[in-house]
Image (cartoon, rainbow, N blue to C red):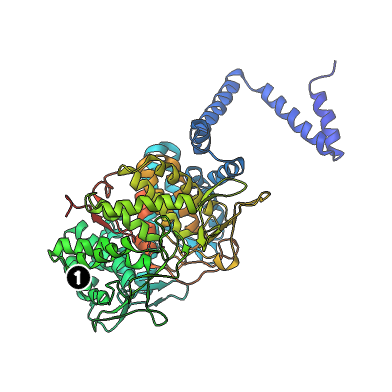
Amino acid sequence: MLPPSRRDFVSLTLSESGSYTNSKQWRRQSCWRKWKQLSRLQRSLILFTLMLLLVCGIATSPTLIGHWRGEIRGPPVLQNRLQTKTNVSGLLGVENQGLDLKNENKGSEGGKPIISWRGAVIEEEQEKSQLLSLLILSKYKPILCSESRLEAVREAFRHAWKGYKNFAWGHDELKPISNSYGEWFGLGLTLIDALDTMWILGLKEEFAEAREWVARELSFNKNVDVNLFESTIRILGGLLSTYHLTGDSMFLEKAKDIGSRLMPAFNTASKIPYSDVNIGKGTAHPPQWTSDSTVAEVTSIQLEFRELSRLTGDPKYKLAVMEVMKQVHKLDGKQDGLVPMFINTHNGLFTHQGIYTLGARADSYYEYLLKQWIQGGKTENELLDDYLLAVEGVKKNLLKKSTPSDLTFVGELSHGHFSPKMDHLVCFLPGTLALGAHYGLPTDHMELAKQLMETCYQMYAQMETGLSPEIAHFNMHEGSTQDVDVKIADRHNLLRPETVESLFYMYRFTEDKKYQQWGWEILQNFNKYTRVPTGGYTSINNVRDPANPNPRDKMESFFLGETLKYFYLLFSNDPNLISLDKYIFNTEAHPLPIWPQAE
Ligand code: DMJ
């Protein structure tokens, strides 16, 4: 009889002949031999450890849990996609990110930033905090995962703030690639937009220095044209919410100042406001090329001016903006509650009729119908009626399914012709629908919200960078192999908040962790493709090219005002952190109080 080693001898000989199959066989046999050589105790220990690892792996995989619970639904294509994405980010992603960092770290020297792509870096501090998260997560995953994600948002904010502080302090927007700044109104837009975010994130030092700038440097007595809508939602809204959160009356005084300087916009024949106001001279005018205003702009300043009236006791602000709502309520030219995009400031009529969208120029009209109704104590029935009608109008005219994956999307209508085009801006809608359902509106609004939330997430997940384009076109013809097409001109990403905003609402109302998970993936992709080494985050030109996303050299103020704030609120498990039963967010993410009773 041959000794046991005889088998090894045969394998070894074949292996030397270069046969791959036999080499594998040899390895197997060699392992088997080693296994047999172990004591019973050693074997039991190894088997036990393997079993333990398997059980832990299954128990902590959100994807598997999701499948077991039936949470991850949708067509197989998307399920595959979700599995892939889940494995590269999120809970497991933190771990993977830790591994990536280790690899990237090879080329770095102590204390120096670690380059992750041209332009984006992960600094040492961030690396430490993420590796720490990795360690913490592997031990106490369910409890501390939220805290480590919150810390990741604080870190992202600090990084954005570093760029703003060093290169754009007191100016409107950071240009993070050229280490300079851009002016729009010359009013420190980013700083004001970011005030309440810093307060909510608990960034005391940053808040204190920004408060000093507002108190000492900010003056609205300037010969400058500002856009009524943009300065209302960002500046007036930002100052009012910061006043409410802090109780610091300096912010209220500044809010009164800018609010009264914006009022000349309403001096028009129709009382529909002009788009532009010179806040120093007290004059207002439409844009140079038209006497029209944008419908979304004139109908999305109401939360702020109504609140200003409540705080000052002066009804003029509220009267001016409610006059606009009254007129729009009665106007001809709507289709099933959907509004055109333009309104004339001379005669108060809709212009460019026949085009209906939930995207640019109409979006926040719908959002503010619902939010004013909530703000005012749910008694202003015309607002509610218009909102409910519009949701039915969306369902009837704009809602379709894509192929191959049956994603529900909101398209556009142009003179009876349907276009499967959806702006990223439309992704405010799942959150707004969910908010309405929370306040007692039909439950099918929540069902629609869930479907649209999935679509908005897929607008990120199906892109090569994991970041959404500005506009997506959905395929509807049989035989399509992908749901989302992006035209070359639409491939940019401006660091917009709408999807993260909706994820926040969806998580608050359902407590379904998948929404936090989706947000976590998006935050990581912002870090990967838009983070700039010297501070700040940049808009990019091409979400389809991970090798060269092509930075645009601009950090919009809403990235700090909205996007990072909604990330933070999404990752927080505390429903009382800006309770949705007490506050209503304006369209720039500035929380304003829901009035104690209807006024
Ligand atoms: C913000 O200024 C507001 O959210 C507005 O309602 C839409 N555009 C930007 C963000 O995308």
In the rendered view, tell whether residue 513 sits above or below residue 338.
above
| 352 lies above or below 65 | below
Q: x and y percent of residue 369 in the render?
A: 32, 56
Residue 103 left/right relative to 573: right
The percent coordinates of residue 21 (x first, y second) are 81, 35
Location of the C terminus (image quadrant) = bottom left
Displayed quadrant of residue 145: top left
How packed mark 1 is, by other alpha carbons closer than 10 Å (few <14, some 14-19, many 20 or more), is many
Q: Is residue 43 left or right of residue 307?
A: right
Is disc 1 placed on a helix, strand or loop? Answer: helix
Q: Nearer the viewer, residue 314 or 59?
A: 314
Which percent across, then down, holds residue 405? Answer: 59, 45
Which of 327 and 139 lies nearest the eye of the viewer? 327
Q: Amino acid at mark 1?
A: Lys
Residue displayed at 12% across by 63% down: 313
- Give the vertical position of 335 relative to 210 (above or below): above
- Ligand number 1: quarter of image: bottom left
Let me know if residue 526 appears in the view. Answer: yes
Q: Residue at x 45, y 67 (%)?
A: 353
Comparing 78 with 119, the one in front is: 78
- Between 268 and 335, the residue placed more toward the observer is 335
Give the side of residue 356 with respect to residue 201, left or right. Answer: right
Q: Number of labelled discs?
A: 1
What residue did someone put label 1 on?
Answer: 254
Q: Residue furthest top?
A: 1
Task: Look at 55% across and 44% down and name the residue there.
Answer: 82
Q: Does 50 sit above or below residue 325?
A: above
Q: Is mark 1 within 8 Å of ligand 1?
A: no
Q: Percent from the top left, x then y, of residue 441?
A: 33, 43
Quarter of the N terminus within the rendering: top right
